[in-house]
Image: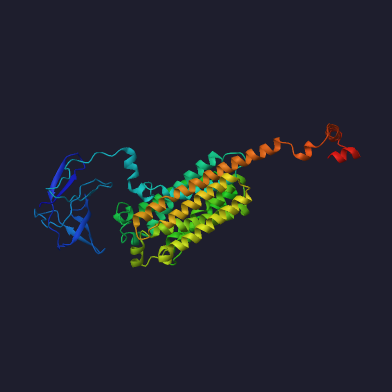
């Protein structure tokens, strides 16, 4: 079985074929996942992963015509990546893998799959949504009765959530570069794979924070100071997994800052009686969904000494998540009562309660795929609550309009002479004298 390296030349679209020399030293029992050919160096580096999760590297020289004949190697096709690098293509000549050049990518696909886009997780927007929803809740709660939330503020905070979530991911990858390379799920991230340098990440982070600052400057000064104060949480969060089993708590404090900022952006200050329960509810919600997320990596994290609530809760995870879910719903009820919310809001809380109960009951903490799906489903929780707040605020305005247009029983009992006397007295700015007969009719 002959193994080939196929690559495109930089100056044309012609394909060339080269035979791969034998690995030295032999590493039978491994499975090649990917290799990178650097145009500026004569060597090919093939990354190999042992089935026991150990890792090694073997260097290949570009000379010689020896072939690799061990049948235990798997075949992979070639895809070009950016930065002048090309992936190693290992395949069986007898397999049905096509030799055709991969179809060119569209502009949008190329952007999404670029190293910078993957650094800020553009291909996984769930994080941006989870960061935006507390902002949206607060903006919707602060809207006047009978009114929709301010669309400009929603757009502004949506853009800010996208940018700042990307900045947070960049900071996280810079802090965790030494860890990500040892975890199966994260070892293909751009900084670990060498697609971007640390200097590139610093430059990109500065650009993201600059855009975030421009968005923040669109708000009032109270909100600018409040928003800037959250930057410390953004920076220290990636370090928490090294010192405490509660990094999800710090993430919740960071991700739900918008519950305070959204209200101050529309009202000029924070109404703490409404926003503090909302903020604490969001923190509990983050602990729930990020604990589920952390169960994907708990085996690797335990080996590396990384701490998380997934490891802290262990087999009692469902009990802990039930408690935090209950606290979340309790905080939302308190916030709704302060804001005088109506039945659509509380109906939404009922749906959310059922969603969380089903999510926790059916969760398989030992199945990474199930954990990932449950984590992503929390986007629906944010959307349901947002719609409940909007509909509850609209209905609250409808109820106030109905009550103001319908005369009260006391007003209906006033006789025409009494009503006209009150109107005349008001016009003359005098206090009306109510006759005994009129008083008994009131």
Q: Where is residue 209 in the image (x, y as percent from the top left)?
A: 46, 50
Seen from the viewer's position, the closer of residues 214 and 25 is 25
Name which quarter of the figure residue 176 lies in.
Answer: bottom left
Q: Say if residue 219 shows up in the picture.
A: no
Name which quarter of the figure residue 239 lies in.
Answer: bottom left
Residue 434 sits above or below residue 167 on the image: above
Identify the residue at horizontal 50%, vertical 46% (top origin).
384
Q: Where is residue 142 in the image (x, y as percent from the top left)?
A: 60, 45
Left or right relative to 356: residue 2: left
Q: How many marks?
A: 0
Identify the residue at horizontal 13%, vertical 51% (top origin).
3
User: What's the image's color scheme?
Assistant: rainbow
Q: Say if residue 34 shows up in the picture.
A: yes
Q: Position of residue 184 (x, y in %)?
A: 30, 58
Residue 235 sits above or below residue 154 on the image: below
Q: Where is residue 58 in the image (x, y as percent from the top left)?
A: 19, 60
Left or right relative to 240: residue 387: right
Location of the C terminus by quadrant is: top right
Name which quarter of the figure residue 403 lies in.
Answer: top right
Seen from the viewer's position, the closer of residues 32 and 334 is 334
Seen from the viewer's position, the closer of residues 43 and 358 is 358
């Amino acid at each position: 079985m002959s193994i080939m390296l196929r690559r495109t030349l930089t100056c044309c679209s012609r394909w060339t074929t080269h035979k791969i020399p034998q690995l030295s030293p032999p590493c039978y029992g491994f499975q090649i996942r990917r290799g990178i050919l650097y145009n500026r160096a004569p060597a090919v580096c093939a990354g190999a992963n042992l089935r026991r999760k150990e890792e090694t590297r073997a260097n290949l020289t570009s000379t010689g015509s020896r072939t690799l004949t061990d049948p235990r190697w798997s075949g992979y096709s070639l895809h070009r990546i950016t930065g002048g690098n090309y992936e190693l293509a290992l395949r069986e000549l007898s397999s049905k893998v096509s030799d055709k050049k991969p179809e060119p990518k569209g502009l949008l696909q190329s952007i999404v799959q670029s190293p910078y886009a993957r650094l800020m997780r553009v291909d996984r927007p769930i994080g941006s949504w989870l960061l935006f929803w507390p902002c949206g809740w607060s903006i919707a709660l602060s809207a006047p009765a009978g009114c929709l939330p301010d669309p400009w503020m929603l757009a502004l905070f949506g853009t800010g959530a996208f940018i700042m979530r990307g900045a947070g991911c960049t900071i996280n990858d810079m802090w965790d570069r030494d860890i990500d390379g040892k975890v199966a799920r994260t070892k293909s991230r751009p900084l670990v794979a060498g697609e971007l340098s640390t200097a590139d990440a610093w430059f990109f982070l500065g650009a993201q924070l600059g855009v975030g600052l421009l968005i923040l400057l669109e708000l009032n000064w109270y909100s600018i100071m409040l928003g800037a104060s959250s930057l410390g949480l953004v920076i220290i969060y990636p370090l928490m997994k090294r010192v405490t089993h509660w990094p999800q708590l710090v993430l919740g404090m960071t991700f739900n800052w918008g519950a305070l900022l959204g209200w101050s952006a529309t009202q000029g200050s924070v109404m703490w009686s409404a926003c503090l329960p909302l903020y604490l509810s969001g923190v509990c919600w983050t602990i729930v969904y990020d604990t589920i997320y952390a169960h994907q990596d708990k085996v690797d994290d335990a080996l590396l000494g990384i701490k998380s609530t997934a490891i802290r809760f262990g087999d009692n995870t469902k009990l802990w998540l039930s408690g935090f879910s209950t606290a979340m719903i309790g905080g939302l009820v308190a916030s709704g009562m302060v804001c005088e919310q109506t039945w659509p809001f509380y109906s939404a809380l009922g749906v959310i309660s059922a969603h969380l109960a089903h999510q926790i009951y059916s969760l398989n903490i030992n199945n990474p795929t199930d954990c990932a799906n449950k984590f992503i489903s929390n986007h629906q929780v944010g959307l349901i609550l947002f719609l409940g707040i909007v509909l509850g605020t609209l209905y609250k305005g409808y109820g106030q309009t109905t009550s103001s247009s319908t005369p009260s029983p006391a007003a209906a009992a006033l006789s025409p002479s009494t009503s006209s006397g009150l109107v005349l007295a008001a016009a003359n700015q005098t206090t009306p004298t109510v006759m005994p007969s009129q008083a008994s009719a009131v």
